[in-house]
Image (cartoon, rainbow, N blue to C red):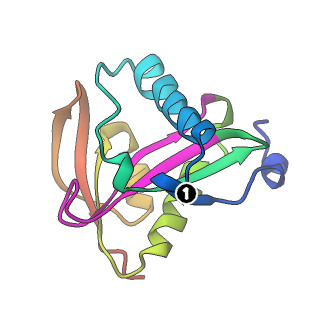
Amino acid sequence: MGHPWCLNMFSDVIKKTFDELTLEELYQILDLRNIVFIMEQKINYIDTDYKDQYCIHYMIKDKDQLIAYLRVVPKGKKFPEYALSRVVSHPQYRGLKLGEKLVKIAMEDYKGEPFRISGQAYLKSFYERLGFEVVKGPYIEEDILHYEMLAMNLE
């Protein structure tokens, strides 16, 4: 754990609709989001926003344990464009670029379709490296500074 040579031990990116998720996967998704967003980042919000049911869920696992996750929100459910949402890596697996891998694969799956995000301000340069540009902000969302960012996703 924590070393690039371990990456080959991790699963390939798993992609599932909400209905394809196992109960264990759903539980682990909610748990990881709670660990990072509520416990670690101290965001006081309700994570279950009833968008998960429409999303495609991207996961990386270490054996059977979820270690990185994001969801692709369909056009019209959050923004007019597709959205990346709930991008998260388990604290013990940070620095392995798992979030970057998930973002790149999700965007490749929707090549030619723009993506809009509401990204936490401290991740602005991360998203800029992945082709996003600030279109609004900064602004406060869930008591945290955010930027609305757009990637045309053409290349």
- Corner quadrant of residue 81: bottom left
- x and y percentages locating residue 51 in the rendered image: 31, 47
Residue type (three-letter) at the residue carrying disc 1: Leu
Residue at 17% in and 65% down: 80
Between residue 127 and residue 8, name the one nearer to us: 8
Image quadrant for the C terminus? bottom left
Q: Give the range drawn in magenta.
A: 67-91
Q: Per the image, is 2 magenta? A: no
Can residue 100 be seen here? yes
Q: Name the residue under label 1.
A: 102
Q: Main secondary structure of the magenta part?
A: strand
The residue sitting at 60% across, 41% down in the picture is 25
Q: Quadrant of residue 49?
A: top left
Q: Is residue 97 visible?
A: no
In-front residue for pair 14/128 = 14
Q: Position of residue 66 (x, y in %)?
A: 65, 40
Location of the N terminus (image quadrant):
top right
Q: Residue at 39% of width from left, 56% of height from top?
A: 55
